[in-house]
Image (spheres, rainbow, N blue to C red):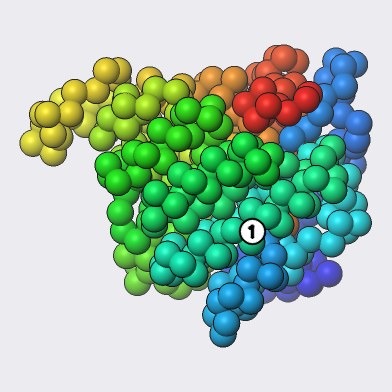
Amino acid sequence: MTTRRNFLKTGAAAAAGIVFCGCGLVHNANAQQSRQKLPVTVNGKRVKTIDIHAHCHFREAGVLLGADADKLQLPPVNGAAEAFIEIDKRLAAMDAQAVDMEVLSINPFWYDRNRDLAGQIVKIQNEKLAELCASKPDRFAAFASLTLQAPDLAVLELETAVKKQGLKGAAIGGVVDGVEFSDSKFHPVWAKAEELGVPLFIHPQGVPELNKRLSGNGWLGNTIGNPLETTIALSHLIFAGTFDRFPGLKVIAAHSGGYLASYADRSDHACLVGPKGCNPDIKLKKAPTEYLKQIYFDSLIFTPEAIRHLAAQVGAEQIVLGSDYPYPWQLAPVDHIFACSSLSDDDKANILGNTAAKLLGIAA
C-alpha cells in the first residue's frame, strides 16, 4: 500500500513539474496476470525451481553482537524483518514466487570481528542452517557461513558444513577487511572448496571507500556499489591467476556478477593497451573472458532483455535462478526467464533449476 501511495504521489508531483525518486516496487498489472505458479513446467515437463539467492538470519547469532545486533542484522530496508524465517510465511512466499526450493545464505556481517567471536557466530549460523534445512529438505538448502578473516578456521568450517551438516557450499562477501580474494592467504579456502567440489556464492557488501561519492538519492551504495564490488572481486580472481591455480573452483556471483558480464570484452584488451598496469609475472592461461565459464551468474537482472544479453555473453548454461528474497528486488523471479524468447526450452529449464541441482548435488 505504501508503494502504491508513493507511486500516485509521484505521478501527481510529476504533473506539477516535481519528480520524487523512491526505491519501492511498482507492480505491473499485466505482469501479475502472467505470473508463473507451482508446479512450474517447461514444454509440459515439470521443473524443480531452485532459487540460489535467498537470505535469512538467526537471532541466536545476533545476540552475540550485543548492541550492534539490530543495526547489522536488520538494515532499514523492506523485507528485512522477514529474514528471520517463520516457516509457514516463507513457504507461502515461495509458493507465490513459483519457487520450489531456496538455497539460504547469510550476508557476512562478522568479517570485522575477532576470530573467536566470528567463529561463534558462524558455528551457530551453520548449525541453525543445517537444522532448518533438515526440517524441510524438499524446500530448503543452504550455503555455510565462514570465518573468512581466519582462513585456517574457514577451511575447517567448510569441511564440517559440507561433510557433516549437509550444507551445499559457502556464502562469502566480496572482500575481507580490504584484502582481495586473490590474496594467497585465502588459497587454502579455495583449495578446500575445489577438493569438496562445492561452489562459493559471492555476495557483495558494498564499497565503503566510495561512500562519499555514493551518498545522496537513489541508495547508490547498493544500487551501484554492490554490483561494483562483485565486479572487482571477480576481476581480481581472474587477473591474479586464481582461477588458473584452482581450475576446479566453482563460483556463483550474485546480481549476475555485477558489471563484469556487461563489459567483459574490455578485460581482454586492458593489458594490451596498458601493459604497465599488468604484472608481467602473471601469465594467464586463457583470455580473461574465458574465465567467465568458471563462474555461475544468478538471474537477478530483472528483464528478459537483460537475461538475453547475459546468456549471449556467458552462456545460458552458466545462469541460475536468484531472487534476493526476502528483500523485494524481484518477487517474480521465474517470469522473466519464461519471457526471454531467445532461450530454448532446455535453457529455461536449466536456468530455473536443473543447473543449480547439478551444481549443488540436489535431486531435480
Mark 1 Cα-neighbour bin, 10 Å: few <14, some 14–19, many ≥20:
many
Compared with 275, 133 (above or below) is below
Seen in the picture, residue 146 relative to 216 is either above or below; the reply is above
Nearer to us in this view, 353 or 110: 110
Is 353 located above or below residue 65 in the figure? above
| Rendering coords of residue 346 (x, y %) | 72, 14
Q: Residue at x 62, y 26 (%)?
A: 359
Looking at the image, which is closer to me, 272 or 114?
Answer: 114
Residue 162 can be seen, yes or no = yes
Report whether 266 appears left or right of 38: left
Quarter containing the N terminus: bottom right
Image coords of residue 198 (percent x, y): 56, 32
Q: Is residue 1 left or right of residue 253?
A: right
Figure check: 222 above or below 36: below
- Front position in the image: 350 or 264: 350
Residue drawn at point x = 67 percent, y = 22 percent: 358
The quadrant the C terminus occupies is: top right
Count the labels in the image.
1
Picture coordinates of residue 284 (x, y %)? 24, 23
User: Residue beneath label 1, please?
Assistant: 125
Helix, strand or loop at label 1? It is helix
What is the three-letter code of the residue carrying label 1? Gln
